[in-house]
Amino acid sequence: MPIGGFVIQTDITNCNNCINKLKSIKNIDIHGMNEKGDIVIVVDAPDSIEMENIINNISKINGINSVLMAYMNIEDEAESNG
Amino acid sequence: MNISRRDFIKKTAALTAASCAGITIPLSICNEAKAEEADKWVRGTCRLCGAGCRLELGVKNGRAVALRGVTESRTNLGYVCMKGMLFYKIIGHPERLTKPLYREKKNQKFKEISWDKALDIAAKEFAKTAKTYGYDSVAYYGSGQSQTEETYLFQKIFRVALQTNNVEGNPRLCMASAVGGYMTSFGADEPIGSYSFIEKATCFFIIGSNMAEAHPVIFRRVMRRKLDNPKDVKVINIDPRISPTSRIADIHLQFKPGTDLALMNAMAQVIIEEKLYDEKFINDYCLLKQQGEKDVKNVTFEDYKKFLEDYTPEKAAKICEGNITPDKIREIARIFAKSKATLSMWCMGLNQRIRGVWANNLVHNLHFITGQLCKPGADSFSMTGQPNACGGVREGGGLCHILPGHRTVDNEKMRNELEEAWDIPKGRLPAKIGLHTMAMFSAVNEGKIKAIWINCTSPAQSLPNADLYRKGLNRDDVFVVCTDIFPTITTEHANLILPTAFHFEKTGVYGCTERRSQITPKAVNPPGMAKPEVWIAREWAVRLAKELNDPIALKSVEPFLGLEDGYALPKAIWDEYTHKTTKNRDNDLSAASYEILQEMPDGVQWPAFTADFARKGGTEIKFVKGIDPMADKESKDDKPFQFYGRPDRKLYIWLRPYKGAAEEPDAEYPFVLSTGRIIDHWHTTSMTGRITELMRANPYSFVEINPKDAEKLGIKPNDMVEITSKRGKCIMPAKIIEGPIEGMVFAYWHDMHDDRMINKVTKDAFDPGSKEPEFKICACKIKRVSGPVPLKPYIVTI
């Protein structure tokens, strides 16, 4: 069950809309934003494939420019694969 | 406060991400949970792309369990892309090669053998071949993904023990034109500035680079700069294809592929015509040069102006076509010249061209005539494709014409310096330049090279016109050794496959785009019997010297005998490389010891020849007195910039005419084929193809077709399309998209499947200067062969 910390870069004029859309996605916690339109989220996904799907879906939201990872924990999955 | 371990990890994730974005969020951390965190965090560099992002691998009970970006790193400021995030999955992947494999004939099955036997076979074959057919019948083909210690040691063994300069690497396929451009324009290789220029630039001139996909973390910085300063920062994107990079551009110029040389000359014409040039900078620092029939001649500024008369915006717009108009050319030329700081960034779109060196020269020209150089934010900055193309291959002597420390093979004094450094007799190092990549694999085809060592790369898939060169690799009279972590298309042609340790399973240094060397220490053990390449090379060389009955051959590894391979061995190699071969060279890394590299969050930028300076991070801007210690040391006058690359201390403005592609479309092959990278995959997918998430995201190659062309040819989305050139054909699904300009198709080059391996179609013509092939342009025809067909991703297995 991987957990990832991401920074989502948005067009500041669209930031609130993006936050509203992010709120509708399962397994996401929104932790804050800054004046530039960067949003910090944490994704807690059942597996890393689902994590990838979530990130892909976030990338498609209108107004979101990029999704960048800053932290990833995969130890449960690494152990179950091993 | 009691929180669960899972909550703790989530808070850590949030804090780390917030730290990157400069956001303060109040979170308390539970000490009990912290005790269960990774046993250790090992700081290293990402394995994929040339950006050099720093990250930390979390290790628990000897297994890789977590990753985090390094916020203090000046390369990535804590960010990592999705591809980088998932590379840990290669560590301990079940399909890793774990035992040496051998077969005498290429139609036989591989058998597992011991390391002793494998190294004996390799030594006997290379020694026998060299003694029977001469030293130039053997070759090494390496990689911009090998660590510097590995490239350095392999090239030393081939040059000292086997006395050949047949030492090449896959950066020939991606960065050689950039090297040629820097060498001919500056007299010194590699960019002058740093990534830190991104936050100071007011104009980005991005040409021939889809950095949004190829270098996403660097692109984030460019995008951030633009978003923070939407009016003051201009982004100009020059690309015949609309790519994700184009989306942030103020101006995107789309043109007939291969005509950008005319465009850049036209920009220079406007800059001079409208007197936007920096006369003082030109007078102080530049000479004008033109290649004559026999030699290079000096020309005057008036000659340059006259030369550019052939490239007025009106004339160039007719050559370039697409959406380029004379007014657009004038507009971008004015923005480029008038900007407070213009930063040009490019990659394979300029390099992989029949006139790649000239294209590089023409970007440099724009900076020279406008003085957009050596000041914060202004630079002519070539992006690198692979993580150690710069550090290992360009600096470490990994090409057939260069020696470690930015020396050249054809310079006797430089060869003598290395002979002294390596304690071998004067005259031992061969003076003859070796075979460049395309010549090397042609020689394999012809049976002139009879033993080749291929390390950490897959030329059977990555060479242009690949089928032609696979024939040579398949000859039974050509002995092929592959050192790799996974089976590849190339290991299918091998006699001997040697399993190697992966990143974080060994210690070594990568040098990224911005002259920055960064260490990645061993964090976990390699699987099975896999070993670091430096151990393999050393043990092979000992046996080779014995087979050659040549005590001088042993000198290539003598200083490293008996050293433990996890740390002491690569450290000794790094120390020899930096102290004995880079000292007093422009890429002086003599102060960048393993100890200092490990202290630094983001390594050291050369030149750096005192420990105190290295601890500050090294040289942010080359050639500037007061910033670059080499500029102070080499200073010849009171000018602030010292271009010490060549004795005359001058930058060369080259008069380079527009020349088209090696193969232009015609009636039979009416389309231009271009190829490139996508965000989810790395090179030949031998690694990323084995990561389920990345393979699911992009399971096979597509060919992008302009909607107007698709309509004319009756091609619908996902229809199967045959792409044919004079060399071969592929069939892959169509993506109908406003991406490539009309008349151009764009195929993803990573797919291993024989039906979709686009390098069967690409052309093997190469730049006469850099010898880099023109992957980016060839003529082809396309036709619909069927509707959508279910496809499966394909990965080679043994």
Image: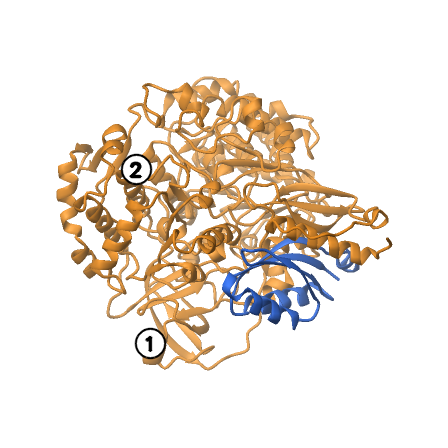
User: Which residue does the numbered mark 2 point to in the structure image?
Assistant: B371
Q: Is residue B434 visible?
A: yes
Q: Chain B shown in which color? A: orange
Callout 1 amino acid: Lys
Residue on which the image places disc 1 = B708
Q: Are marks 1 and 2 in contact (CB under 8 Å)?
A: no
Chain letter, blue in picture: A
Judge from the rendering whether residue B25 lies leftward or rightward of residue B378; answer left or right.
right
Mark 2, Cα crowd under 10 Å, few <14 / some 14-19 / many 20+, is: many
Task: Tell me, yes or no, if residue B549 can be seen here.
Answer: no
Q: Quadrant of residue B201?
A: top left
| Parent chain of label 2 | B
Q: Residue at x 41, y 54 (%)?
A: B209
Q: Quadrant of residue B45?
A: top right
Total numbered circles: 2
Residue at image location 69% in from the left, 49% down from the top: B98
Question: Nearer the N terminus, badge 1 or badge 2?
Answer: 2
Task: Choose between B196 and B454: the one closer to the eye.
Answer: B196
Along the viewing direction, whichever of B214 and A44 lies nearer the viewer: A44
Please tell me whether residue B386 is drawn above or below residue B418 in the rendered image.
below
Q: Position of residue A14 (x, y in %)?
A: 52, 66
Q: From mark 1 to mark 2, how far is it between C-alphas?
A: 42 Å
Relative vertical location of residue B151 with respect to residue B29 in this rendering, above or below: above
Specify whether B775 is left or right of B524: left
Image position of B281 with respect to B111: above or below:
above
